Image (cartoon, helix red, strand yellow):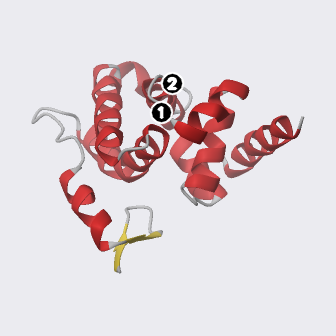
Amino acid sequence: MLQCHDPGGSRATFELDYLVPALVHRPLAPPVNAPLAYTAFCHDHWPVYWRFGSAVAGSSHRGGELARAALREIAARWPVLLGSASLAAAAWDLLSQECAARRTGPAARLHRVLHRLEADTLVLRHKMGLTPSQAGYAMGLAEADFELLHSRAVLSLGR
């Protein structure tokens, strides 16, 4: 097994057959004239965006396409997103919407019975194995707010 570190410092483990798609699906190369903050945002959020897209679409290739499409949309709206209350939350909403139509398997079933962001919390925590802190950061939420949304999703599933 190969151990890799993502920018957030958490450790991810890849099997060798998983490594090839990981190398192929590099982050969207920001335009040369892209603001430095956007470039940093792309590099910081790419690993989770790609893994999330892959988890909900059931394909690492499709996950890369979805993450790139979301980052292009974020670039197009960058000045507006900078003025939002939470840049990361607004960006996550764009990614989540981009992935909405491509969900397959268990992710698609979750999204039929739960609010989109509630279902996203379950994918982040249980499919991807992120901690509440990591998942909250990805979604642009404080850890406590993420845990509240996650708890609401779990309670909704129990009904």
Estimate how packed mark 2 is, as few (under 14), some (14 to 19) or many (20 or more) residues with alpha carbons within 10 Å: few
Which residue shows up at 47% across the image and 46% down it?
Answer: 55
The reply to whether residue 141 is visible in this rendering is no
The percent coordinates of residue 145 (x first, y second) are 73, 43
Q: Quadrant for residue 130, please give it.
A: bottom right
Q: Quadrant of residue 150?
A: top right
Q: What element carries label 2?
A: loop
Q: Which residue lies furthest to the front in this view?
A: 105
* Residue 29 in the figure: left or right of residue 12: left
Residue at (87% x, 40% y) in the render: 158
Which of 95 and 2 lies nearest the eye of the viewer?
A: 2
Amino acid residing under circle 2: Ser
**In the depicted structure, whether residue 36 falls above or below residue 17:** above
Q: Is residue 104 left or right of residue 75?
A: right
Q: Which of 137 and 120 is in front in this view?
A: 120
Q: Please indicate, yes or no, whether residue 6 appears anywhere in the rendered image.
A: yes
Judged left or right of residue 149, residue 159 is: right
Label 1 sits on a secondary structure element that is: helix
Which residue position is annotated with label 2? 84
**Left or right of 90, for residue 21:** left
Q: Residues within 10 Å of mark 1 (few under 14, many from 20)?
A: some
Tell me where residue 13 appears, x and y as whole percent: 41, 72
Query: Which quarter of the figure is the N terminus placed in?
Result: bottom left
- Could you say which disc has been placed on residue 114 in the image? none
Judging by the rendered image, the residue that carries numbered circle 1 is 87
Tag 1–tag 2 contact (CB < 8 Å) = yes
Q: Check the image and report above or below for 140 versus 147.
A: above
Identify which residue is drawn at 37% across, 62% down: 7
The answer to which image quadrant residue 70 occupies is: top left
What amino acid does circle 1 point to?
Answer: Leu
Residue 11: x and y in percent read 45, 72
